[in-house]
């Protein structure tokens, strides 16, 4: 991979990873437009690691409070709302892990077709817009019961369909349950941590089993670029939600899906 390809794809991955616009759609379209080869497993691991570092660093205080409260609850002491959220996030993570193990890489890769990504981008994008317009705007994550977290987790599991957007699906579920836009986004970001960590672990094992040597210097640059761009995306996305809502992302997803269909059609 040339250095400029690495830079562009790392920035694309970092920016789109936490926005409700589907990183998979962008990572199939950009290489196709420029005629680049697949970025490979090592690149995916590096950029996922960068994204994970970004979200942990950005929410480090919230995560620290939740970890401390969860630890107190494990020992039988009162953990408060933070402990309840921590248990909820653990529960919400289980459906995606279970479905991911059931499908395996082969099953998920079988869905990674341009027309599937386009249809998911358009269909779930319109659904996101509809839910966002109709949903109430009054709750914070503390009011969610465990079954609410489970519902968000099931939505996250559906995001294994390429193009649906993990962030988009979890934010949509949170809005449906009455969370404010920033609250739904925060839950979505927190849920990204265990899922991304699981993906990194799997990719690391797969990479170790490959005999080819990885270009570690380039991968380190990709990880840093992904981390910086992901942190900026999180920051400005949360600010945009206050003033513009989710509709710009809905429109963008529909346009992106139409472009994918125009470029690729319904080819397998």
Image: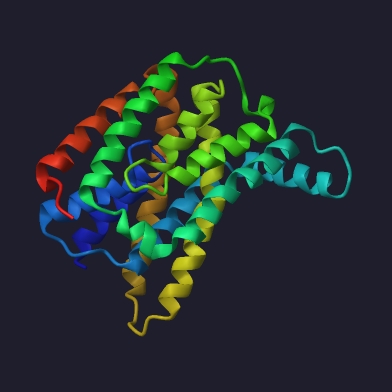
Q: Residue at x 61, y 38 (%)?
A: 150
Left or right of 10, for residue 46: right
Among the 4 quarters of the image, the one containing residue 211:
bottom left
Q: Residue at x 68, y 24 (%)?
A: 143
Rendering coords of residue 108 (x, y %): 37, 57
Q: Residue at x 19, y 49 (%)?
A: 29
Can you say whether 16 is above or below 209 in the image? above
Instruction: Give whichever of 85, 225 is nearer the camera.
Output: 85
Left or right of 85, for residue 174: left
Q: Residue at x 34, y 71 (%)?
A: 217
Rendering coords of residue 51 (x, y %): 44, 51
Among the 4 quarters of the image, the one containing residue 106:
bottom left
Can you say whether 16 is above or below 48 in the image? above
Rendering coords of residue 124 (x, y %): 35, 33
Can you say whether 28 is above or below 216 in the image? above
Instruction: Give whichever of 119, 163 is nearer the camera.
Output: 119
Left or right of 57, for residue 74: right
Q: How is the image coloured?
A: rainbow
Location of the C terminus (image quadrant): bottom left
Seen as rendered, the residue at the extreme right is 76
Location of the N terminus (image quadrant): bottom left
Instruction: Give whichever of 60, 79 is nearer the camera.
Output: 79
Among the 4 quarters of the image, the one containing residue 118:
top left
Rendering coords of residue 72 (x, y %): 83, 45
């Amino acid at each position: 991979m040339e250095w400029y390809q690495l830079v562009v794809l790392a920035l694309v991955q970092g920016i789109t990873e936490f926005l409700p616009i589907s990183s998979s759609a962008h990572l199939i379209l950009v290489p196709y437009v420029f005629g680049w080869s697949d970025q490979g497993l090592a690149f995916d691991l590096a950029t996922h690691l960068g994204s994970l570092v970004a979200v942990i660093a950005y929410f480090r205080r919230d995560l620290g409070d939740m970890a401390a409260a969860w630890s107190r609850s494990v020992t039988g002491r009162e953990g408060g709302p933070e402990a309840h959220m921590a248990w909820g996030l653990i529960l919400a993570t289980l459906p995606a892990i279970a479905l991911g193990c059931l499908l395996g890489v082969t099953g998920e890769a079988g869905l990674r077709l341009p027309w599937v990504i386009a249809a998911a981008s358009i269909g779930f994008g319109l659904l996101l817009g509809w839910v966002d317009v109709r949903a109430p705007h009054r709750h914070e994550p503390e009011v969610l019961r465990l079954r609410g977290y489970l519902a968000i987790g099931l939505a996250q599991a559906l995001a294994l369909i390429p193009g649906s957007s993990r962030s988009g699906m979890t934010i949509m579920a949170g809005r449906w349950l009455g969370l404010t836009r920033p609250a739904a986004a925060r839950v979505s970001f927190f849920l990204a941590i265990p899922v991304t960590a699981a993906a990194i672990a799997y990719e690391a094992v797969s990479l170790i089993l490959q005999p080819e040597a990885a270009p570690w210097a380039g991968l380190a640059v990709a990880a840093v670029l992904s981390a910086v761009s992901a942190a900026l995306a999180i920051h400005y996305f949360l600010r945009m939600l206050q003033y513009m809502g989710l509709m710009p992302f809905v429109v963008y997803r529909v346009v992106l899906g139409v472009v994918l269909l125009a470029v690729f059609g319904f080819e397998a």
